[in-house]
Image: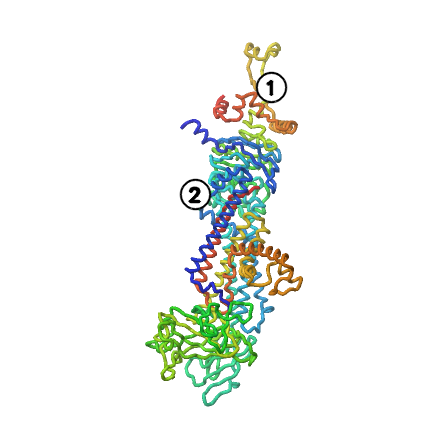
Amino acid sequence: MVVDPSEFISYGEWLANALGGFVVLALVIFVAWTVIAFALTAIRNTPGQAVSIVGGGLKRAIFEDFPRSSLQRTIGMSRLAIQEAIRNKVLIIFALFVVLLLFAGWFLDVQNDHPARLYLGFVISTSTYLLLALAMFVSSFSLPNDIKNKTIYTITTKPVRAHEIFLGRVLGFGAVGTVLLLLMGIVSYVFVVRGLDHSHTIDTASIEWDEETGLGTGFTSVDSHHRHDFLINRNLEGEGPVGVTEVAQGHSHTIFRDGENYVLGPPTGDLLARVPVYGSLRFLDRYGRESEDGGINPGKEWTYREYIEGNTLSTAIWTFEDLSPEMFSTGPGGDEGVLPLELNLRVFRTTKGDIEGKVRGEILLVNPDKALPVRERYSAPIPFEAEEFQTFQINIDYNDIRKQNPDTAELEKVNLFQDLVTKGSLEVHVRCRDHAQFFGMAQADVYIPAPEGSFEMNFFKCYLGIWMQLVLVTSFGVFFSTFLNGIVAMVATLSIVVMGISSGFIGEVQSGENPGGGPIESLIRNITQQGATVELDMGETATSVIQALDSLYLDTMESVANLAPDFPQFNMASKVAYGYDIHLELILKQITTTLVYFTVLLFAGYFVISSREIAA
Amino acid sequence: MSKSVDDKQDVIIETRNLTKVYKDFWGRPKVNALESLDLEVRRGEIFGLLGPNGSGKSTTIKLILGLLFPTSGQALVFNKEASDVSKNERIGYLPEESYLYKFLNAEETLDFYGRLFNMSAGRRKQRVRDLIKLIDIEWAKRRQLKEYSKGMTRRIGLAQALINDPELIVLDEPTTGLDPIGTREMKELIVRLRDQGKTILMCSHLLADVQDVCDRIAILHQGELKEMGAVENLLSVRDITQIQAKGLSEEAQQQIRSIIESDQADLVSMENPTTTLEDLFLGIVRDSKARPGYNRKRERDQQEPVAAAETTGASDESVDSEDES
């Protein structure tokens, strides 16, 4: 799973950085409104009158309209929006969603390796698309319809303030969307849980027993398009588990004894909410020196992960902070316990070798206190084997953490927290052992799993992200509808969503990180069949003109895209599907972003409505 | 309190040099919808705006309500700028077509508009009940407005205009779509509202309705004010004197005034005959078309400054003195 590097920034730090952006956003909209309002008024009247009218409008907004806001009126407007939406039969969207779920079996791959990811991805993305499309449609057409049907006359001739018209619609449509989202969320949860729930049977006669150890192996029955290998220990007594199955389709089952037979418990491990404790990442180059450029890029275009070279001193170093013995120790004095590490490494092979085989690596636990002698700081290497595309967990038992005595060359047991952790800080060094092979990693690829969170709560947080997108889209839809007609307002809202989703890509194209040039250059490259990475062969002058035009276009696009909300930030489907807890700080960032956009759009909507001639 | 302050408080609507020019996309003037309109509507009167289609009546109302912004000049309502939303607390507006939300029923409609006036739940409920009774629509109060006839919609439109018990009621074509009984009831209601002290500004094409209920009227044509004054003054034919006498001798008929006096006959009436509003209206429109720029009011004001002062109704004293006589 890919984790956006911005997620590692703490809320306080993020807010301090984002505050500047928010102020710029507010200023841009405020200045744009003032300039446009002044220009239009000056055309209609004289520049002197325009100053007085626009200034008067600002004064009225600050001293009269906003202070005299009424909850009652806003509720009235919201109720109207709700009634309008319901009587326009928007609830049919829910029916459509249910129908899609009913027939999901027709188009979902039931033999998928990770059905939980598939089901969750399906229900979350379907809910998101349906709701956002609905919000875009309803919010963009409502106000223009009121203006077209002139029903707005009976509103604006009442003591309703312009921002109450905006607010009422956003809250009303938001409320309808919330109810729909809740219903979809409940149905989705039931669909996923029931869809994944299954059991298998074990044919006792088919179990192969090892008479010496009392261990039995075999296969379960095929149910839900899969079966499991299992291992049972018949010597275990009591009502507890006597065995466990291998992981298949992303889950396993615990096995219990039932008289002479064995039964399987419900599937486990498919609906998780792992809480990762992330560390910061830095690299050492092949000679063991601090690398300023990070890891190696072995030629892959995607730069999310960086690589370390095998059988060299090239090292990836994660520094974990705020660790305490209580997190892992089980015995008194911190002598007993397990340090769990989850690794999600990529493997890049430069020699074919055994393509099915795993690549070897090693972990060293290192005390970050550089004042200590080197021999005191490093644990002995802890070996592991990595496989492409597999997340695996290494549980480092305290008893296995050793340090080589430089005098005797003997491996001696060390105490993790006394010898290797300083002020809660621990370094984990990862190296690749195999020559000519590489490990690829990003900051989120090695972490310490804290106690697992609740899947249900994670699911709820994910839907909270959809809800915030709903509020954003509704706010933009209503805002655009204050000065555009319905269909244009909807296209404008859609453009904002697309801009928000692709702002990263636009930035990459603009900066040249994504080669091939802007729209004109890439079109020419397509027609003339020139590769994206070679120089454009059109002659010096023509190339300069093309690139200048592209640059102008991309600069404009990037500026607009930077004003749009970062919609991918709100999409947390992959976190839920891959079983990672959604951190509260991420939710806080999203709530802040939503509130800022909502507030800015509320003010912008107020100024547009109050400065437009409703009956013109 | 000085008289001028009283006068100021009595002026509910005032327009000063109010002008509206509709412009095209490029900002070029397209239509002069209203030109330098000066008028005052005073507390407690029924003021009618008359004019053919495109004369500027609706534009005037929209400017007064703040639905349009003036190109120049000013519209004041309760001495506040028309764009000031707080003035709407005291206004009720019945638009030309009862632009209402068709998916609501009568009760929901009135309750919704009641909320917009920040009315408490109890007061809203009471007001909704009273108004539904007033417009006699109890039997259909739970039906969606899309099922209503035009007359019923008109009535619910009127009810929404009265929900806040307004001081100023602006009625755009109030009798449109009503049957004769409905029209009569509407006119009676308008007069009743005036008698309760409310001020009414209405515009209508139906001249008989205006003649029946309005105290004063203004006639607009091609965006210009062509005539304004008290209805009875405007309809009076000033250059003709009509005398009705009983038992007048043949001789006395030759020297009417002196003979009436000398003969000590009973003078039944001596007055200017009145024309109909329809004749007046059509005459103004005809004159205006034949002589663009011709303004009957201005001409009359120049000829009879004293009479002009009376017809503008600017002085309540003149009305009072007429009433007393």
Q: Is residue B165 visible?
A: no
Residue at the extreme front of the image, as rendered: A540
Mark in the foreground, 1 or 2:
2
Q: Which mark is residue B240?
A: 1
| Residue A65 x/y as whole percent | 45, 44
Q: Amino acid at mark 2?
A: Phe
Q: Few, some or many C-alpha atoms within 10 Å of disc 1 (few <14, some 14-19, many ≥20)?
A: few
Q: Residue at x 47, y 63 (%)?
A: A6
Asked if badges 1 and 2 are on one and the same chain, I answer no
| Residue A303 x/y as whole percent | 52, 67
| Residue A512 x/y as whole percent | 56, 61
Name the chain under label 1: B
Residue at the extreme right of the image, as rendered: A528
Q: Is residue A538 above or below residue A418?
A: above
Please state the total of marks drawn on the protein image. 2
Residue B33 image-quadrant placement: top right
Disc 1 is placed on an element classified as: loop
Point out the image quarter for the C terminus of chain A. top right
How far apart are the two marked residues, 1 and 2, measured between alpha carbons?
59 Å
Q: Which residue is mark 2?
A: A63
Q: Amino acid at mark 1?
A: Ile
Q: Is residue B211 above or below residue A443?
A: above
Q: In this rendered view, identify the residue nearer to me: A41 or A201.
A: A41
Q: In this rendered view, identify the residue nearer to me: A173 or B121.
A: A173
Q: In this rendered view, identify the residue nearer to me: A225 or A135.
A: A135
Q: Few, some or many C-alpha atoms within 10 Å of disc 2 (few <14, some 14-19, many ≥20)?
A: few
Question: Mark 1 near mark 2, Cβ–Cβ under 8 Å?
Answer: no
Name the chain under label 2: A
